[in-house]
Amino acid sequence: MRDMRTTLHYYDIFPKVFPTGKEIEITIKPLGAHAECKNPDEIYLSIYGLDDGNPRDYPYRKNGTRVDFTYDGVLKFKYTFPREQQYYVRIFDKETNKRLLQMSVYALDEDLCGRYPLIGDLHMHTCRSDGRQAPAIVSANYRKHGYDFFAITDHHRYYPSLEAIETYKDVPIEFNIIPGEEVHLPDLAPDHINDVHIVNFGGKYSVNGLLKDEYADEFGYDIDKRRFEGFACPDMITEDEYREQVDALATTLDIPEGIEPFTYASCVWVFNHIRKAEGLGIFCHPYWLSNVHQVPENITDYMLRTHPFDAFEVLGGENYYEHNGFQTHKYYEVLAKGYDKFPIVGSTDSHSSINNENAYVASTMVFSPANERTDIIDSIKNFYSIAIDGISKEFRLVGDFRLARYATFLLQDYFPLHDDLCYEEGRAMKDYACGVEGAKETLEFISGRVQKQREKYFAF
């Protein structure tokens, strides 16, 4: 046996994740004859808790417990992992005490058991607004990259996300395409303007589609282009009616001097509608450099203090420091000031799924009972999400320390294997969207593999 950076490709260990305080049987399987154990009597196995100190320096903590095992082509052992943390499973040579192999597993407390890690993107664009590829192709390309779910959120438009869903409705895929849009409502000059960018993730009707304006003329007045699964959709209103509703709402809000009442009240109006549509309202990229920072600082601060939104896009689609760096600092700063905690997400805000250095700049890991729209939204609202910064080769995480520790393990020890399966499905999805013969049969053949992999690695 050998300990090397290619361990995941030499050995399979399962389950990888399981509850604390329960005896678990762990299997280590060599992946090929080159990885087989020739002399099992000449090795021993020990368990090390990552948080429990070096046994040489903290001997009374008894880290490095030896565990009995059996070997008949695969190695098996049973162990009760006492508390939540990452554990190293190490195999040593008996004669020299040289470490031959190290693999990692993770024990979880009860509240995280039954929640599976899903990678997703909640904000991106296609050629239906200012992106480059068609909705179906963007979907396939992001599945190839390892995403479990995403929403197409084109500017002013809800129907492109429905177009992507429609493309794949007759084939079994494990990629969850969720309806969405980036909400931009009309500027009603001179003092009724709102340029705060808001994403409607998973809402079952379009907020853009509530207004009778030039974009409604573009996509038409068919109600099924502005709602999902026949959801009850409010009647459309005129721009004058929209202004009257927002002005009336502003009188009920305690808006500080120096903040434009219509701007803030319009945001609240949008977020209220997203909730009525059973979606997740996301406050997006206030530190995007659009001439200057896209949102004035006092509005950003007030939004984060009052959080009329459901989630804050702490990481977004630019790779210069002022964007994600400032948003990360702001997030931790307002929590340190005692502002109420609010959920966070990371998204690419991508405008191209290929040949784009920002295509995978950020994402969200959600710990959800299932890869379903309602479960994902509820999990984010209940703080079971963490934002992933993918600007550099070495990922960075923003969010709760507990989730960051667990997510680090998953990104290193689970998702590389998961992503292999996603890539194959994404390729077949693209073939299917392009009319390649046999693509549907391929998707049918590989359907269910990601779920089976989850069931293998997560012993819930």
Image: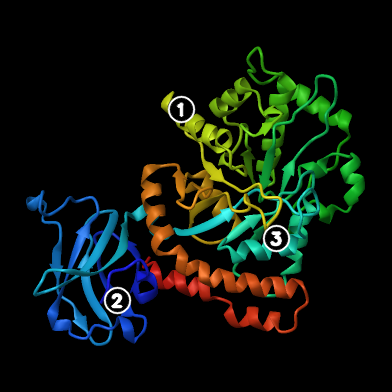
Q: Secondary structure at mark 1?
A: helix
- The residue drawn where x is 15% and y is 61% is 64
Residue 80 image position (x, y, % from top left):
21, 64
Nearest the viewer among 265 and 297 is: 297
Residue, x 53% and y 32% (percent of image)?
326
2 or 3: tag closer to the N-terminus: 2
Residue 255's spot in the image, x, y percent? 65, 18
In primary-sequence order, the first of circles 2 and 1 is 2
Q: Nearer the viewer, mark 2 or mark 3?
A: 3
Find residue 25 and report its image quarter: bottom left
The answer to whether the residues at label 2 and label 3 have Cβ atoms under 8 Å apart is no
Disc 2: which residue:
27
Q: How many angstroms separate mark 3 from mark 1 (CA)?
A: 35 Å
The residue tagged 3 is 138
Q: Could you tell whether 164 is left or right of 343 in the image? A: right
- Coordinates of residue 238 in the picture (x, y in percent): 89, 34
Amino acid type of disc 2?
A: Thr
Side of 80 relative to 240 (left or right): left
Residue in view at x 75 percent, y 71 percent: 433
| Local SS, label 2 | strand
Dot 3 or dot 1, earlier in sequence: 3
Q: Amino acid at mark 3?
A: Val
Local SS, label 3: helix
Separation of residues labelled 2 and 3 (CA atoms): 38 Å
Question: Residue 358 at x, y = what percent?
Answer: 62, 49
